[in-house]
Amino acid sequence: MEAFTVHTGTAAPLRRSNVDTDQIIPAEYLKRITRHGFEDGLFKAWRDDSGFVLNQPQYFGVSVLVAGPDFGTGSSREHAVWALQDYGFQVVISSRFADIFRGNSGKAGLLTALVDQDVVERLWALIESDPSTPVTVDLAAQTISAGDVVASFDVDPYVRWRLLEGLDDIGITLQNEADISDFESARPTFTPTTR
Amino acid sequence: MGKTLAEKVWDAHVVRRAEGEPDLLYIDLHLVHEVTSPQAFDALRATGRPVRRPDLTLATEDHNVPTIDIDKPIADPVSRAQVEALRKNCAEFDVPLFPLGSAEQGIVHVVGPQLGLTQPGMTVVCGDSHTSTHGAFGALAFGIGTSEVEHVLATQTLPLKPFKTMAVTVHGSLPDGVTAKDVILAVIAKIGTGGGQGYVIEYRGEGVCELSMEGRMTLCNMSIEGGARAGMVAPDETTFAYIEGREHAPRGADWDAALAYWKTLVTDADATFDKEVVIEASELSPFVTWGTNPGQGIPLSGSVPSPEDAADDVERASIERALAYMALTPGTPMREIPVDTVFVGSCTNGRIEDLRAAAAVLEGRQVADGVRMLVVPGSAKVRLQAMSEGLDKVFTQAGAEWREAGCSMCLAMNPDKLTPGERSASTSNRNFEGRQGPGGRTHLVSPQVAAATAVTGRFASPADLAR
Ligand code: SF4
């Protein structure tokens, strides 16, 4: 996983609340066998609508999503996080996230920045009036700055640490590789192998 | 203070314990199947990580495989892609695989024990909730998600928060005609489908100790339907006798060392459980579910419940919804409900003893007109064993279909499905809406009740046939 320190990119306003994981990516995509390439399923039901925010040319190439409250509710599918990342999002800003979605995001390296709804409203107004405004998310300082909007955000300290270090769960475990090897060399000889 | 069985196994696998962190637990056996593994392998490829211990990993094809014409390509493209991805991944990462058609292929939870790979005191994981089955051997065995599958493949460990412990004690011997399936359905009806949440259940008492390994596997298999992460039974002579001589069982001095260790794997007399549930064996009888979750079960002698009986509004709504989906009228005796399909199989009841039990009921009898009965062995080995005992003849002569090994009608992922509105008596573990096919209506039963039901065309126990 790549380390996340400061990210600057343009942002898209998603003026909807209670966007559940089925809306983020519908169940039909769960049959796939790859870990990547889910961008085509992101917000599938809305993507045919030319008025949908991600279909408007001024929001092409965005990497920050500013969403309404209760983002990521519903089924625990990890695909929702993968789809957002595959599309190019590195940060989702909202005033409320569903717990499981937030946990899955932290594991996969997608930053979920929790802010007051009033910050969301100001960001929406700003990026709607000028979609080219760069939004800077500084994870070390826990701040978001865009135009005249400067705000701090909340993130789980453990998730923050791993993002800053660029460690996924496996990376963290492998830091203790010596412990694993020690354990392995002490395993009883009667434990079976599959060969 | 003493330790419970689950705590002993847990503590013996802690690779690293640090303040404020989950324990890092070593995994002795990682079972893999085609549905939950492709993304894990794909992620390993993307990060350039190898499988740490392919020699502690084993893959088999089960969920998607057809149970007839297995020499032909799999017709459904999604199923075929999953199976092909597994073959490619296992070849690339050097993981042993039992593909469709091989002598050891079968449902992942039938294959492990039958090879002697599941042993007391081990940690066993698989990207499948019914991994709890392996707990029958006194192993700590539980299902994991796809990102955890990746974690185990890469590190052979898992960071885990401790479980709570629950004891389910079955006092006294099971009455005649009562099986492990009836016990677990009664347990779930008692504790509810969420009752075991956060717990590892240890099943104890005479009613459990007297069960065969097959019966114990049935019991532990459905722990997950009670909400528990895992189920366990302390290993004893029955366990040791089952393992001894199997392909991967320890031999010689290793066997003696293993046995000495396994005998320590019991809950200490002064250990305490976080929760205790007691079941009186004498009150048990053949069980059947009427609703759309495994907790909605009653004795076969009972009648379809009414929403009026509900303790609260939530339960009332749930009963109403279940009755509507199942097309049942309150007050109808279970024995009067006709079925279209009978399914004997799955990782709950697809082992040799289950097939023997069903065959014993069917011997010299006929499946009722208009009823389709599918008998699907849990593994290719079980299938061969059954054929060597002539059980296939009993089934086919009775008018049942004798199939190849796989998950089959346990879930609607392969060609064996219910059609909308069809009603089944099924030895599997889940009666959720659409589980056996969209609109299908599932009633969970033991193999004995399934076979008797096939004969009468309505829910029945073997005792009903004798009458
Ligand atoms: S038989 Fe059913 S429950 Fe068991 S592994 Fe297969 S699909 Fe899952």
Image (tube, rainbow, N blue to C red):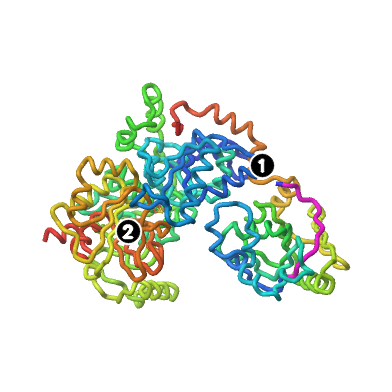
Horizontal relation, residue B399 to residue A154: left or right: left
Horizontal relation, residue A105 to residue A116: left or right: left
The spot of residue A65 in percent (x, y) is: 73, 64
For mark 2, what is the residue?
A: B186
Q: Dividing the picture into quarters, in which one does residue B185 lie?
A: bottom left
Horizontal relation, residue B207 to residue A172: left or right: left
The spot of residue B17 in percent (x, y) is: 60, 39
The spot of residue A156 in percent (x, y) is: 70, 55
Within 10 angstroms of label 2, few (less than 14), some, or many (20 or more) residues? many
Verify whether residue A12 appears in magenta: yes
Marks 1 and 2, Cα distance to the nearest angstrom?
44 Å
Question: Depth check: B272 or B20 in front?
Answer: B20
Q: Is residue B85 above or below residue A83?
A: above
The spot of residue B129 in percent (x, y) is: 46, 52
Question: Depth check: A68 or A11 in front?
Answer: A11
Kind of element beneath mark 2: helix
Q: Report whether mark 1 lies on the same chain as mark 2.
A: no
Q: Is residue B409 above or below residue B384?
A: below
Residue that sits furthest to the left in the current view: B467
**Looking at the image, can residue B237 be seen?**
yes
Q: Chain of mark 2?
A: B
What residue appears at the point 39 percent right and 31 percent down from the top-left corner? B248
Residue A77, disc = none
Q: Dividing the picture into quarters, in which one does residue A79 lie?
A: bottom right
Q: Chain of mark 1?
A: A
What amino acid type should be assigned to the residue bearing mark 1?
Gly
Q: Are marks 1 and 2 in contact (CB under 8 Å)?
A: no
For mark 1, what is the residue?
A: A171
Residues in magenta? Answer: A2-13
